Amino acid sequence: MTLPHQLQGRLRLPVIAAPMFLGSGLDLVIGACRAGVVGTFPALNLRTTEDFGDWLTRIDEALAEPDAHGRAPAPYGVNFVVHRTNKRIEADLEQIVKHEVPVVITSLGAAKDVVDAVHSYGGLVFHDVVNAAFASKAAEAGVDGLILVSAGSGGHSGGLNPFALISEVRRVWDGPLVLGGALSTGRDVLAAQAAGADLAYMGTRFLATEESIITEEYRKMLVEAGADDIIYTPSISTIPANFLRESIARAGLDPDHLPVPEKVDVSHVTNPHTEEPASTSSTVAPKAWRDVWSAGHSVAGIREVVPVADLVDQLEAEYTTAKGDLLALIG
């Protein structure tokens, strides 16, 4: 297993704090990078391209200097939706190139022109996939790595077991792999590497930090929930995703009798700040993430809300202990 040279020696732990819609803010991204893991956020968390560019400027400035111990921060990344319904593709891509964003995570399509633009300044493109077919398309587009979104991931999730997904994708891809899905501890990070991944993708676990931009009620729900409190359904956003049962009920829906979407509609993802309904179907797509809150099965491992720096310390300690336990087991 090898990392792209742009990441080698830059990470304290092989972890990416996944981009979370309406969850990843400036403090979380900067805090994660300063703690030694890749911090990321969705470009569409910002209402305008101008606001997006402002965030990039502020992140660049915050990460320009080493910390008090002389350590350089880890690189940051941006989630970039490349679906044709995203009306900001060209303008946001200009900002990405202007700021030379180190890691670009593409979603809802693998676009070669985007890959070429990021490669023009030496950046990395990781693309998220849920099966081998999408992995093959991403490979053809020339991406640098694949993010495997397996069963149990927060947000838009795949339905395959992580071991099966890694095995299938390795038939068509021999490059860097990032594994996401129900990872909440440093032991899980090591397990992902043992299974064949190079990096771990952790979203829900970083939501339960003081720096995330979710509400206190949302944080409390993450701490109190178990894996059985996660519902995998296309009814909220028309694309299968994992949501907290309690938040579905509080939004006035019956978690056990959710409406069936009439069609896939990603306009609420590519144009998330519109006040108009994203669809005339019987779903509640406009409320996804705003009123109906997402989380993955990793809530099973969340017991408290902590600062992001403390979380990375905890993950590192767990990771180190797990390595020692594994060496003792195989030695």
Image: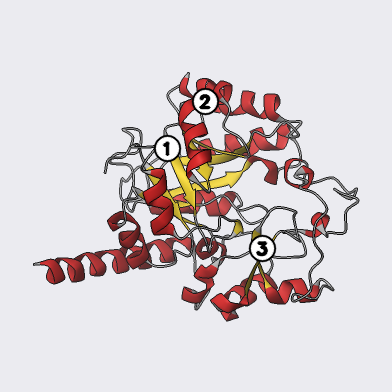
Residue on which disc 3 sits: 214
Residue type beneath disc 1: Gly
Percent position (x, y) of residue 18?
52, 52
Residue type beneath disc 3: Ile
For the N terminus, give its image quadrant. top left
Q: Are marks 3 and 2 in contact (CB under 8 Å)?
A: no
* Front: mark 3 or 1: 1
**Tag count:** 3
Residue at position x 50%, y 48% from top?
30
| Mark 1 surroundings: few (<14), some (14-19) or many (≥20) residues within 10 A | many
295 with respect to 282 (left or right) = left
Residue on which disc 1 sits: 145
| Mark 2 surroundings: few (<14), some (14-19) or many (≥20) residues within 10 A | many
Residue 81 in sight? yes
Residue type beneath disc 2: Val
Q: Residue furthest bottom?
A: 224
The tag earlier along the polypeptide, 3 or 2, is 2
Residue 37 in sight? no
Percent position (x, y) of residue 66?
37, 42
- The image quarter containing residue 330 is bottom left
Residue at position x 82%, y 65% from top?
259
Question: Dot 1 lies on which element?
Answer: strand
Q: CA distance from mark 3 to mark 1?
A: 29 Å
Q: In the depicted view, which residue is nearer to us: 41 or 1?
A: 1
Question: Dot 3 lies on which element?
Answer: loop
Q: Which labelled disc corresponds to residue 115? A: 2
Q: In the depicted view, which residue is nearer to us: 314 or 267?
A: 267
